[in-house]
Image (tube, helix red, strand yellow):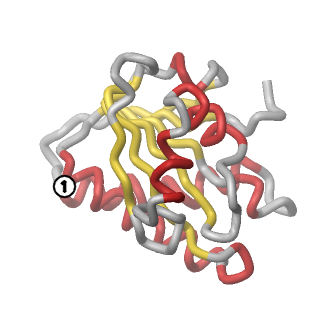
Amino acid sequence: MQTREAAEPVEEVPAEVLVLFHLEDEPAPRGRLGRVDWILLSAVSRLRVRGKFSGERGATALLSPNQKLKADRVLLIGLGQCADFSKTAFYRLSYQAAQILLDLGCARIALDLPYRLFPQEPPEKIRRDFLEGFTAELQRGRPDVDFSVTTLLPPDQP
């Protein structure tokens, strides 16, 4: 399994699937998710307005960026309410995300982790904590596949 960090713009990250996370109590997409929403002509916002995806915990939506991004697909995963999100929920999320990606059959994965939900934690620790469960679940599910996992650096890091 290959893992790397990337600082390039979200639209330039090559992957079979780009995974983004969304809080239920944020009315509009923020950060990189907001950028992807803008590039995809408000696809995420339209899903919310139609009641198809609002960021509730465990909810998912799969988007096709139609070559507007270097990623083939965009996977949205709901985090639930900000006040209810914890380190335990974060760890469970790593396994859930891996299971979804195993079901999709993806091997080249890019992740925009929700670093801002843990402002007291160093980004490297957040990345390490997520990848521990995530990579273990990927390898357990498909031990024969050489996965490539890219994590996007927090926006304020070079």
Residue that carries the numbered disc 1 in the rendered image: 103
User: Residue 100, relative to residue 7: is it above or below?
Assistant: below
| Residue 143 position within the rendered picture, expressed as x and y whole percent measured from the top left | 17, 49
Q: Identify which residue is drawn at 83% across, 34% down.
A: 156
154 on left or right of 144 = right
Point out the image quarter for the C terminus: top right
47 on left or right of 103 = right
Among all residues in the image, which is located at the extreme left? 144
| Residue 121 position within the rendered picture, expressed as x and y whole percent measured from the top left | 80, 60
* Amino acid type assigned to the residue bearing label 1 in the image: Asp
23 on left or right of 65 = right
User: Residue 154, relative to residue 95: is it above or below?
Assistant: above
Residue 101 appearing in the image: yes
| Residue 9 position within the rendered picture, expressed as x and y whole percent measured from the top left | 63, 21
| Residue 85 position within the rendered picture, expressed as x and y whole percent measured from the top left | 65, 76
Point out the image quarter for the N terminus: top left
Q: Residues within 10 Å of mark 1 (few under 14, many from 20)?
A: few
Q: Identify which residue is drawn at 26% across, 36% down.
A: 107
130 on left or right of 17 = right
Numbered disc 1: secondary structure: helix
For residue 134, what is the image quadrant? bottom left
Residue 1 appearing in the image: no
User: Residue 120, relative to residue 82: is it above or below?
Assistant: above
Q: How many labels does the image show?
A: 1
Among all residues in the image, which is located at the extreme bottom? 84
Q: Identify which residue is drawn at 80% across, 31% down.
A: 157
